[in-house]
Amino acid sequence: MKAQERHHLKQNEFVHTAARMADTFTAHRDRIVVVAAVIVVVVAVFGGYLWWKKRTNDQAGALLGRAMAISQATIAPAPTVPGATQLAGTYPTEQAKQAAALQAFQEVAVAFPKADAGLAAKYHAASLLLSMNRLPEAEQAYRDVTATAGRSIYGPMARLGLSSALLAQGKNDEAIKVLTDLSGDRDGALPVDAVLMELARACVKAGKIPDAKAAFKRVVDGFPESNYVAEARQKLTELN
């Protein structure tokens, strides 16, 4: 077939295809217009959602950064010169710094409860409450984190913190239950050998020496390269 004839056939095919498309559009014009409008609306809504989510995360992240900065601020004695004010970014006592940081973390957690930064803020608030010896509040805060953390690293970390809050209140059996569950999660985010050491110490505190020895032995036998092996062996010797 000559090149000119092939070119002519391709032109005819294109014309027929274009004509069919035009007929199809005419026959279904209203439906096509509706579908196109729906697509535009969906794209606009989805784009708006992504913009809103990014804006929310940016705001939450900025507030979390501010709270973290407060928690790590420098302690500087209050000025004694008349009229002088506290140096910006510093606090006169550790207690004052902790109170300010706690308030900042709690504000983030309340304002952005579903954002990652809000969850992180809730966890840090719980840790501060524990360090401030506000134990019932710390316990509840850790429980709140575990209830909403999902698969986040803050879930197991909050459970570990919860065990500390329970132990500090003398709720030894509850704390041991939390640590026992954590130690059984070999695919979890926390090192099992570290959790076992916490479990063993909790058992010692509760007077459950056989259970403590069993936990220390699991560290020695199951994690021979662990940094805790030497301490676990020493504790076993002391408990025998």
Image (spheres, grey):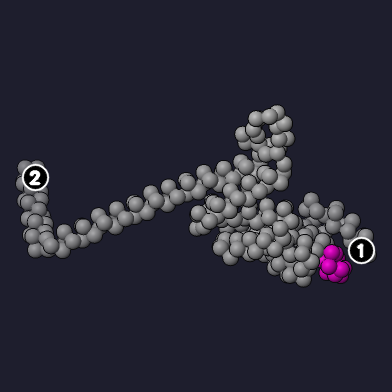
Crowd around label 2: few <14 · some 14–19 · many ≥20 (10 Å): few
| 30 relative to 9, above or below | below
Q: Main secondary structure of the magenta part?
A: helix
Q: Position of residue 48 (x, y in %)?
A: 34, 52
- Give the distance between the C-alpha atoms of the residues marked 1 and 2, in whole angstroms: 95 Å
Relative placement, left or right, of 38 versus 122 is left
Residue 176 seen from this side: no
Badge 1 element: helix
| 201 relative to 12, above or below | below
Magenta stretch, residue numbers: 203-214
Q: Residue, x 11% and y 60% (percent of image)? A: 29
| 59 relative to 179, above or below | above
Q: Position of residue 40 (x, y in %)?
A: 25, 55
Instruction: Give amino acid for label 1.
Output: Leu
Taking depth in this image into account, of 165 and 220 the one nearest to the observer is 165
- Inspect the magenta stretch and tell me whether residue 211 lies in it: yes
Instruction: Give amino acid for label 2.
Output: His
Identify residue for label 2.
7
Identify residue for label 1.
239
Crowd around label 1: few <14 · some 14–19 · many ≥20 (10 Å): few
- Inspect the magenta stretch and tell me whether residue 53 lies in it: no
